[in-house]
């Protein structure tokens, strides 16, 4: 929709019948991510290619990149797809993450658990999203069942960060190195799935500046063209650690649709299309609440009836548990984001939920 507003026509390649993006786009190709015939026909139909999901095929993108510009590059996708490559890259740029060890075998898991201590978080290196593919290990008895359950191997063990807050920064970068970043925001997860984003994050300027600096460092290090979200932890000492990166529009940036002259989606399109990147300003503070699974999707009529709630429903066919079905944004005059109880009030009946 952001691209259409800039006068572009979008052509979606998706595996799904009736995908939300295809519902509002000019063209659609329904194909898996690797079929060379469909990929070639798709590349023929477009001028520039991007992706908004990390679990697409990097090999498929390589084929597309041999035919048309792919932004961000398949190399960046590969870094973000594999938690071991991702954390090695981030640490290599001098940026902190949770302490971590690669885990290829159960013996390596035992060694990693004694090196890092418990609790710790065991994750698949590939294919994880929205908390899928991870387990918290609280005691030694948790090691074997978690190791059995999590596939594909190898895994990664991360030290558990007792964070004071989770934050994120979304940056856009153009082919000429031009750069634009949204304010640092605060994220709250429920069942490992993003629940609420507060914009801006209620952190000292030093923390928010550190987060901005880290996001920029990573974007430059990746030679990014396009959009990148950097998810971070703020620990009890106010230090900022990177959790993971996502080279695409990000759920923690959905508030920008309503609170900014240029949304994250527009910044993405501008960056990949070679348009100017103005500063990513906001005209309001915002609280964004996800509607997750059948339970929250069922609240839709109440959402629509609540003054001040800006509704977004994605048009997904089926409301499976844990699936993001839509979100709600509420705006506040800039500089007046409410405090803790105010945030609960701001969410109304959506804030009363566990
Ligand atoms: N090392 C960790 N310490 C504490 N909490 C963690 C850790 N890793 C993940 N989490 C929690 O789980 C959430 C999802 O983990 P993440 O690695 O971002 O996976 P996903 O790819 O599913 O988003 C994080 O946002 C955070 O709330
Ligand atoms: Mg995450």
Image (cartoon, helix red, strand yellow):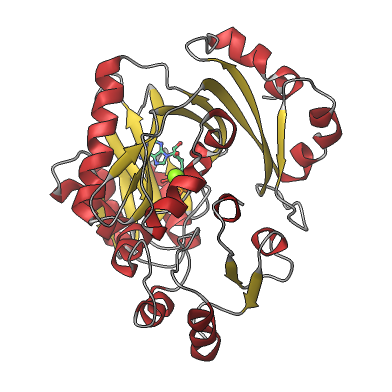
| Res. 28 image quadrant | bottom right
Q: Is residue 23 visible?
A: yes
Vertical side of 20 occupied by 70: above or below: below
Image coordinates for residue 173, horizontal then vertical, percent: 31, 49
Q: Quadrant of residue 287?
A: top right
Toward the bottom, the furthest residue is 37
The C terminus is located in which quarter? top right
Asked if residue 108 is positioned above or below residue 304 in the image, the reply reads: below
Q: Nearer the viewer, residue 12 or 100?
A: 12
- Seen from the viewer's position, the closer of residues 261 and 105 is 261
On screen, residue 77 above or below 277: below
Residue drawn 48% across and 89% down? 36
Question: Image check: 65 left or right of 327?
Answer: left
**Percent position (x, y) of residue 257?**
57, 37
Residue located 67% across and 12% down the image: 345
Q: Residue 190: x, y in percent?
A: 57, 34
């Amino acid at each position: 929709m952001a691209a259409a507003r800039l006068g572009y026509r979008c052509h979606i390649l998706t595996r799904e019948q009736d995908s939300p993006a295809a519902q509002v786009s000019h063209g659609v190709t329904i194909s898996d991510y690797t079929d060379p015939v469909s990929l070639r026909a798709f590349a023929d139909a477009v001028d520039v290619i991007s992706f908004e999901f990390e679990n697409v095929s990097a090999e498929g993108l390589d084929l597309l990149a041999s035919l048309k510009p792919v932004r961000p590059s398949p190399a960046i996708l590969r870094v973000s797809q594999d938690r071991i490559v991702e954390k090695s890259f981030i640490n290599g740029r001098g940026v902190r993450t949770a302490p971590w060890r690669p885990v290829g075998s159960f013996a390596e898991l035992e060694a990693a658990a004694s090196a890092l201590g418990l609790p710790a978080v065991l994750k698949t290196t590939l294919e994880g999203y929205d908390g899928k593919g991870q387990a918290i290990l609280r005691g030694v008895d948790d090691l074997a069942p978690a190791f059995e359950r999590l596939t594909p191997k190898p895994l990664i063990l991360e030290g558990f960060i007792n964070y004071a807050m989770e934050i994120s920064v979304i940056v856009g970068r153009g082919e000429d190195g031009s750069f634009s970043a949204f304010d640092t925001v605060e994220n709250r997860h429920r069942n490992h799935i993003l629940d609420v984003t507060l914009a801006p994050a209620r952190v000292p300027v030093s923390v928010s500046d550190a987060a901005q600096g880290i996001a920029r460092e990573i974007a430059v290090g990746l030679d990014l063209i396009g959009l990148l979200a950097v998810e971070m932890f703020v620990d009890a000492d106010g230090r900022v650690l990177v959790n993971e990166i996502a080279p695409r529009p990000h759920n923690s940036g959905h508030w920008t649709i309503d609170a900014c002259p240029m949304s994250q989606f527009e910044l993405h399109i501008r960056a990949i299309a070679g348009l100017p990147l103005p500063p990513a300003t906001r005209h309001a503070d915002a609280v964004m609440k996800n509607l997750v699974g059948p339970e929250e999707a069922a609240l839709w009529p109440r959402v629509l009836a609540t003054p001040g709630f800006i509704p977004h429903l994605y048009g997904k066919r089926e409301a499976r548990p844990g699936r993001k079905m839509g979100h709600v944004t509420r705006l506040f005059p800039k500089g007046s984001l409410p405090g803790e109880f105010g945030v609960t009030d701001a969410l109304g009946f959506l804030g009363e939920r566990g």
